Image (spheres, grey):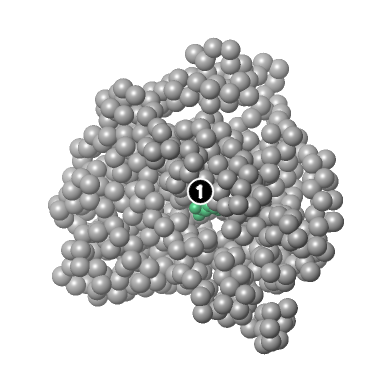
Amino acid sequence: MMCSLWRGSLLTLTSSLNRRVFQCCRQLGRSYNIASCMPEAVAFQGVSDHSGLYKFSVNESDRFWGAVARQRLSWISPFHTVQNCDFSQGKIKWFEGGKLNVSVNCLDRHVQTCPERVALIWERDEPGTEVKITYRQLLELTCRLGNLLKRQGVRRGDCVTIYMPPCPLAVASMLACARIGAAHNVVFAGFSSEALADRIRDAQSSTVITVNQGVRGGKVVDLKRTVDQAVQNCPSVQQVLVAMRTENTVAMTDRDVPLEEEMMKEDVVCEPVAMDSEDVLFLLYTSGSTGKPKGLVHTQAGYLLYTSLTHRYVFNYHDGDVFGCVADIGWITGHSYIVYGPLCNGGTTVLFESTPVYPNPGRYWEMVERLGINQFYGAPTAIRLLLKYGDEWVQNYNRSSLKTLGSVGEPINTEAWEWYHRVVGDGRCPVVDTWWQTETGGICIAPRPSDPEAEIVPGMAMRPFYGIKPALLDTEVVTGDGVLALCYNQYCPLNCATPLLGFFFTGDGAHRSKEGYYQIVGRLDDVINVSGHRLGTAELEDVVNQCPGVAESAAIGYSHDIKGEGECLPKTRSGKIMRRVLRKVVERNTDELGDLSTLDDPDSVHEVISGHRRLCGDGKQQ
Ligand code: 6R9
């Protein structure tokens, strides 16, 4: 059986991991001073280094977050209470009494200081056709769109559904909602009309914003047609604003509004609405790797502060850097680290429209060279895919601009981590494996920030961010099992959705090393139990992935390892392996595969089912 077979190697791997520690950070010099990193820290008594700052952030949480919020956000009126939270009652309130506008924080204040700085680099599908949008231009687009939305009857408190690929008008749409006090509900522009209709109905949107067609990997996709089908079953929808991504005309109905044409009639000034800290900023669905996708809500001040602070410190982002997060804006990673975090910091952020292999597997690195990207943030699934194509695709391009490499979405296996570090980063860029969730809205555990020379262990998220105090609960408390569950028992300005026994329960399992570093071992519902030994999927996959010829693997309970080419594994559109589907296949419960609406390639399920049949025969479970 797979699990007992692998246990020996697993233990060996874990201990060798701990020895192979990378020191991959440049020293700041002998005069390292915490206040030079975070100016607010001057006022925090007794804080002289990173670990002091972290301790202060959890022990003196009110003072920490109060100072940071006053320093980093522009308030229309100040808050009177930093936090008012009680997990046991599900009450989480931050910066009560405060009023602000998120779009002002992301745009107007930067237009005042540096109007011609590039806010967005739209990296369009075809390499070499990028479009740059300055802060001044983005504010104008946002204001025109805000005015158009108001003209179309959108009011404070309404929720607008956005079904668009990454493009400047999608960002302007999000910010226009924030400007006029409406919430947005971005739906990944690859979802079916049924999935889109579900999300429109949930949000009760009267307005949908879309494009005529999308372009990705050289293919044209009729997004407007998908919207047309979806809105047939959405009585709330009164109008669909249609932007033109391609020059091809699409059939327009009475309900449809040509977006560019109508917004050009609007004024470039749009008065920002003063929003309460805890008013809703957006709705967003999870990617559905662990069950039916659920809709979550994030609010204004805490979310903006937390994403901007993590963007600044986890990635060591500085003014003038070009930040390249290659996620889609339809996921939380896109919301937090393409749009809100970078723009709140006055950063330059890349909007990537293409795929990692279009027109060839060198795309990311050719883009890094052409745009001079300083921080690159991607997903393990793409790293594993590119690793398979070999080093030359990377080495063909100049990557000397890179300073930090980030990973998000799944555990990054050691092989992929080392390739990312050694080949992509030439061994000189810290790799930050960032652990977080749609629920948290921002990065919770990552190797940085830390003291400048602090170690980074491959494939380990390691250190909790300021204000985060993870707790590893023996899940006996939770499920009657004996695994550790990752929870928080410290409040920070996050939207923590499911309070449980006074904790926020994440659903993930983790180990803590004697140094206090965290290693995520995978989802608890995926953890494999062999003769009472509990093994995380990440640990098993880490070993399997080291076998030559295995590009990717998914470990699931029930005795057989499903190996094979990456294309065969069922994955969500955000690139996460849907282990729950694999489990049903090996359990032969293929009638109960559950919600597959977020699956990237439904054919992969058929391939796995027939592969499993070939392997095991049609007979009984082995
Ligand atoms: C940001 C995002 C959340 C789930 C999370 C966990 C997994 C994300 C990870 C990771 C190990 C990492 N996950 N980052 N697991 N190491 N660095 O992905 O949000 O789509 O809501 O998924 O993804 O299982 O609970 P979301």
What residue is disc 1 on? 437
Judging depth in this view, the residue of 448 and 606 nearest the camera is 606
Judging depth in this view, the residue of 604 and 263 nearest the camera is 604
Q: How many tags in the picture?
A: 1
The residue sitting at the bottom extreme is 618
The answer to whether residue 308 is seen in the rendering is no
Q: Position of residue 176 (x, y in %)?
A: 28, 47
The answer to whether residue 242 is seen in the rendering is yes
Q: Is residue 617 left or right of residue 360?
A: right
- Mark 1 C-beta to ligand 1 under 8 Å: yes
Q: Looking at numbered disc 1 in the image, what kind of residue is underneath it?
A: Gln
Q: Is residue 203 above or below residue 193?
A: above
Residue for point 49% across, 13% down: 43
Q: Position of residue 65 (x, y in %)?
A: 44, 26
Q: Secondary structure at mark 1?
A: loop
Residue for point 83% across, 56% down: 9
Q: Position of residue 494 (x, y in %)?
A: 44, 38
In which quadrant of the rendered image does the N terminus lie? bottom right
Residue for point 66% across, 40% down: 518
Residue for point 56% across, 48% down: 478
Q: Is residue 603 left or right of residue 610?
A: left
Query: In which quarter of the view is residue 205 placed?
Result: bottom left
Q: Is residue 482 above or below residue 613?
A: above
Q: Position of residue 525 (x, y in %)?
A: 59, 58
Query: In which quarter of the view is residue 300 placed?
Result: top left
Q: Is residue 553 above or below residue 118?
A: below
Query: In which quarter of the view is residue 115 placed?
Result: top left
Neighbourhood count class around disc 1 (C-alpha, 10 Å): few under 14, some 14–19, many 20 upward? some
In which quadrant of the rendered image does the C terminus lie? bottom right
